[in-house]
Amino acid sequence: MMDDKKCCECPKIAIKDMPSDEEAKNIANFFKAISDPARVKMIYALAGGELCVCELMEIMGMQQTVVSHHLKVLKYAGIVSDRKSGKWVNYSLADMRALDVLKALGLIRS
């Protein structure tokens, strides 16, 4: 004989605390952005202050196109912001939570 109860009932608390689709997308983009070793190093470098692409090229030992690609990913995730200064573009951390997350996970020295 079948019971009239549902076979599984979602706990109300799980539904209440679940992020919206937009929030979940932002969280996923954040973690995708910091999932690359080069971007982790860039976050660490930018923790020291604003840097231009040429400075990041020297620090990272990468070509301009590669540095720019990584900065684009970090900027899209809201982790990095840019500021134009004449013909130069300077980058800085826009969201210190990226550095905080990496430190909390023991992935970056304080």
Image (cartoon, rainbow, N blue to C red):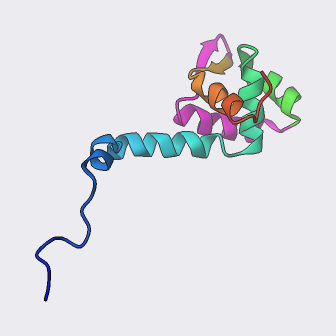
Residue closer to the observer: 57 or 7:
7
Query: Which residue occupies the extreme top position in the image?
Result: 86
Q: Quadrant of residue 91?
A: top right
Q: Quadrant of the C terminus?
A: top right
Q: Residue at x 33, y 41 (%)?
A: 17
Q: Residue at x 41, y 45 (%)?
A: 24
Q: Position of residue 62 (x, y in %)?
A: 84, 38
Q: Position of residue 28 (x, y in %)?
A: 50, 46
User: How many labels were placed on the picture?
Assistant: 0
Residue closer to the observer: 88 or 92:
92
Left or right: where 80 falls relative to 47: left
Query: Which residue occupies the extreme front position in the image?
Result: 1
Q: Quadrant of residue 58?
A: top right
Q: Quadrant of the N terminus?
A: bottom left
Vertical placement of residue 51 versus 3, above or below: above
Left or right: where 32 falls relative to 14: right
> Which residues make up the magenta segment?
62-88
Is residue 75 inside the magenta stretch? yes
Is residue 48 inside the magenta stretch? no
Q: Residue at x 71, y 14 (%)?
A: 50
Vertical placement of residue 57 versus 26, above or below: above
Query: Which residue occupies the extreme left position in the image?
Result: 4
Q: Position of residue 48 (x, y in %)?
A: 76, 15
Vertical placement of residue 75 versus 110, above or below: below
Q: Position of residue 109 (x, y in %)?
A: 80, 26
